[in-house]
Image (spheres, rainbow, N blue to C red):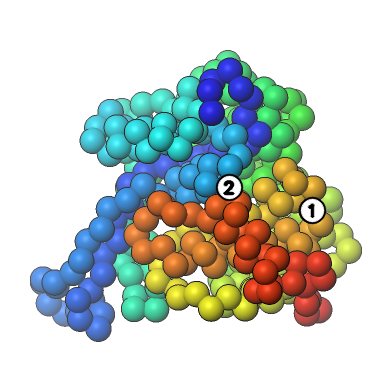
Amino acid sequence: MTASAPAEVVVVGNIGIDTNIYPLGAAIDWSVEANFTENLDYVGQAGGYAARGYAALGRRVAFIGHVGDDLGGRHIRSILAADGVDTRALWVDPAGTARSVNFMGRDGSRKNFYDGKGHMQLQPDLAQCRAVLAGARLAHVNLPNWARRLLPLARELGLTIACDLQDIVQLDDPYRADFVAAADILFCSAVNHAPAALAAALLARRPALVVVLGLGALGAGLATRDGFRVIPPPPLDLPVLDTNGAGDGLAVGFLTSYVLEGRSLEESVWRGQIAARHTCTLRATTDGLISAVQLETYATQGHVNVVRPATEAVG
């Protein structure tokens, strides 16, 4: 994408280098000092998975965020440039490029250790942000502290605002309050709460919200003022190698389908789950995220029914 062509979607958030640590034995032995592992680095974090995910689907993407003036930052810039992502608003974090370390289980699960570098103190160039956001349809916002300053700007410019709250621990978390208040669409993991109760709490604050909950192997929850449903996962015969980025895949697939393509909520959740499921087949990489052709193939050639996906009512 050239800088002169307006983006369809602007991803706002942290991008960085992830390191996945795979034990060569059955698991990490915390009782000893040294373990033998396979350690793999790649461009990741929510901003990396989201920006590269939209690009893989053929959408015009811009990214607003920061990387360090270091090896990791230069690598990220080169990867986004190769993807065609507009990086006019990819600035320098003096603290360096954000990092994550993921201790990986044999089943693809993880324990994450996140270093967001300077994101709590950074201040975005709002004039440059306005130029990048202008003409876009969708702002896909993650949770760096500085991103809250862009929310009123995105609203003023008429973008649909989607915020990914990640895994909520406290329902009244003040850090996330600005993102909940500004969003049209919310994504979050229900790992720490009963899904229906979590959705109800969010809708009590903003009844017009669309809420999409990641439920892991159970599928995804969809909540609006009309109620809450669980949409089961697509029956895809694909291996689960790595669950990193699955939630980002769900969000990218849903938002592309619902906001950019005008599909129904139910179909968009279904297609988002296809994107998430494909993401889990990728081991320690954001290369090879699902393409539009692959998504359409899964959705239309007998793998799944996207017209009226089965739903399960939950109280």
Residue 265 appears in the figure:
yes
What amino acid is found at the position of numbered circle 2 in the picture?
Leu
What amino acid is found at the position of numbered circle 1 in the picture?
Arg
Q: State the residue at coordinates (53%, 23%).
A: 2
Q: State the residue at coordinates (36%, 64%).
A: 283
157 relative to 287 in the view: left or right: right
Distance from disc 1 to disc 2, alpha carbons, whole Å, reads: 15 Å
Q: Nearer the viewer, residue 139 or 208?
A: 139
Task: Decide: is 149 above or below 274.
Answer: above
Q: Nearer the viewer, residue 186 or 301?
A: 301
Task: Decide: is 278 above or below 93.
Answer: below
Residue 290 location (% of width, % of height): 53, 56
Mark 2 neighbour class, 10 Å CA radius: few under 14, some 14 to 19, many 20 or more: some
At mark 2, the secondary structure is loop
Discs 1, 2 touching: Cβ within 8 Å? no
Farthest-out residue, bottom:
26
Q: Can you identify the residue that label 1 sits on? A: 263
Residue 305 location (% of width, % of height): 74, 72
